[in-house]
Amino acid sequence: MGEISLFDAIEAQSRRMYTPCGHGQMIWRIWGEGRPLVFIHGGAGAWSHWIRNIPEFARDRMVIAPDLPGLGESARPPRGYTPESIAGIVADGLATVLPENTRFDMAGFSFGGMLSGLIAQRHGERVRTLALMGPSGLGGRFGNLKPSVKLPLRGTAQDMLDAHRHNLQAIMLHNPASIDALAMHIQSLNAPRTRVNSPEHATSEKLLDALREVPARLCSIWGENDISSPYLQHRRDVIASVHPEAEFHIVPDAGHWVQYEAAEAVNALLRSFIA
């Protein structure tokens, strides 16, 4: 089965739920049965940021992966949105998707890492474990981030593909070989549907502040070559300042989108952590 066919097959296996979001709805995709594991994707993304992780965990868990407000197929959040207000929409939706008092594990990536901390702050003891993949919202700086390219409003299909490839290389993936047909397909679907600006909050301390009030066990997983890589010791230190017992993992030869580029390693780390 080709990678694009695999994408379609994974999506087709999901069942959907809808919860309120602004003037429309937020979409949730669900696979499998068992103890719930919630995946929160990153900025300019959708559920498909977890395409290489969903099949592994849906074998024995209920996997829940929403499209965040203003991203993917979900409606825009109300005007004047903030990370806190977006997290509130997701947290309220999750209270509908899962029966009251059901405990769950949660993993968040990048902007979704920040949001997952804010969601965990709201849900308290319902969250068993919180795993953060390259999260934003810990203060400090990013590394030598190459500027992204705006998607051309006019031009050829090749111009669009070149822009997607550049942005994946500049921000998301370390190895050029990782920019495969599936990564390009995901980027080409997700990027044009981005209607919220997440990078402006990346260097805030919103996640760090939320984690002070999160009782869940915590781990973070980073690609060795993440855009934050010059400051990974800072990330380790600030997380330890609020959760001294938190696990901190660096995955070799991987970039920011670590759960895609090093899916096998991340799946093993996550499965061990949430056991």
Image: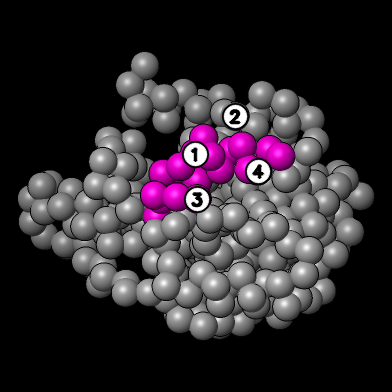
- Label 4 or label 3, whichever lies nearer to me, is 3
The residue labelled by disc 1 is 263
Q: Residue at x 11, y 53 (%)?
A: 159
Q: Position of residue 79 (x, y in %)?
A: 53, 77
Q: Helix, strand or loop at disc 2? A: helix
Where is 265 relative to 139, above or below?
Answer: above
Q: Are marks 4 and 1 in contact (CB under 8 Å)?
A: no
Mark 4 lies on residue: 270
Q: Position of residue 4 (x, y in %)?
A: 34, 28
Residue at (12, 46) in percent of width and height: 157
Say which amino acid is labelled 4: Leu
Residue closer to the observer: 140 or 10: 140
* Residue underneath mark 3: 251
Q: Quadrant of residue 97?
A: top right
Dot placed on the residue nearer the N-terminal end, 4 or 2:
2
Q: Is residue 104 left or right of residue 179?
A: right
In this image, 240 relative to 125: left or right? left
Coordinates of residue 66 in the picture (x, y in percent): 59, 48
Q: Is residue 188 visible?
A: no
- Identified at 77% across, 52% down, the residue is 129
Q: Kindly identify the amino acid type of the residue bearing the numbered disc 2.
A: Glu
In front: mark 4 or mark 2?
4
Q: Is residue 238 visible?
A: yes
Q: Amino acid at mark 1?
A: Ala
Q: Earlier in the sequence, mark 4 or mark 1?
A: 1
Highlighted magenta segment, given as a residue range: 251-272
- Helix, strand or loop at label 3? It is strand
On-image quarter of the N terminus: top left
